[in-house]
Image (cartoon, rainbow, N blue to C red):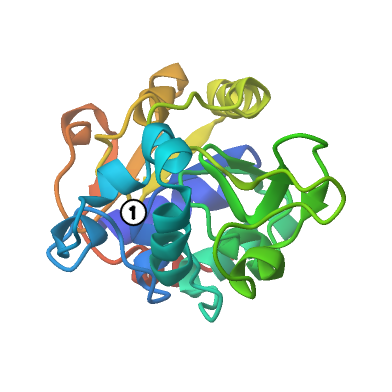
Amino acid sequence: MTPQEQLQQWIQGSDNIVFFGGAGVSTESGIPDFRSVDGLYNQRYDQPPETILSHTYFVGNTEEFYRFYRDKMLCLDAKPNAAHRALAELERAGRLKAVVTQNIDGLHQLAGSRTVYELHGSVHRNYCTKCRAFYGVDFIAEGKGVPRCPACGALVKPDVVLYEEGLDQDTVEGAVRAIAKADVLIVGGTSLVVYPAAGLINYYRGNKLVLINRDPTPYDREADLVIHDSIGKVLGGIAL
């Protein structure tokens, strides 16, 4: 039995699947990741992306933060790929219970997924730091300079988790519950080196841990099935 056939069998035999994904899920939609050869971390800027996307930099260099954020973090023309669509179909079929993602692009929801735990937030949500008024992504994308709340004049911040900031506890707890109860856990498109997010897969208690990633990960030895291939190709080849 090939790895693809084994995955197919496990999916068809389960109604309690959880998917945990990272940047590799969205690179096939044209969104650059952070660590590959062409990723944001290997492009040249006055400051490294890790610095620009930190809480300290956001507070001390807000205008520069937003210049980078609008230029590199808002990929609003991107469309869901075969992986996003396959996961949404699995949820509609009653097999997939949740998507846990490290991505902030909203492509899972755009594909039709409903139960999505966004560990690092979303570019589609922005809030006034004072009155908590909500603003959509267009408010940031179409603006210039530092965005200010029309209601109270305070700074508007994207609902994304910057370096030095903690993850939202409700989101983490929801993700942990879903992973801990899963029959099949499919992990895809992530190098599993970003913590605390990567550590969440340790809550899985089942015996069908699937890792789908182009490159090896630190968890390959612990997985029950490893597929080194395109996440879109693999999930897109699943028949319901």
Image quadrant in which you'd find residue 37: bottom left
Q: Secondary structure at mark 1?
A: loop
- Locate the N terminus by quadrant: bottom left
Residue 1 visible here: no
The residue at 52%/50% (across/down) is 11
Total marks shown come to 1
Image quadrant in which you'd find residue 127: top right
Residues 156 and 162: in front is 156
The residue at 28%/42% (across/down) is 51
The residue at 49%/23% (across/down) is 166
The answer to whether residue 24 is above or below residue 17 is below
Image quadrant in which you'd find residue 131: top right
Left or right of residue 66: residue 17: right
Left or right of residue 35: residue 102: right
- Which three-letter amino acid code belongs to the residue tagged 1? Gly
Residue 186 visible here: yes
Q: Residue 19: x percent and y percent?
A: 51, 44
Q: Residue furthest right?
A: 151
The answer to whether residue 214 is above or below residue 152 is below
Q: Residue 152: x percent and y percent?
A: 83, 45
Residues 145 and 226: in front is 145
Residue at numbered disc 1: 189
Question: Few, some or many C-alpha atoms within 10 Å of disc 1 (few <14, some 14-19, many ≥20)?
Answer: many
The residue at 39%/49% (across/down) is 22
Q: Residue 2: x percent and y percent?
A: 25, 58
Left or right of residue 91: residue 221: left
- Locate the C terminus by quadrant: bottom right
Residues 65 and 222: in front is 65
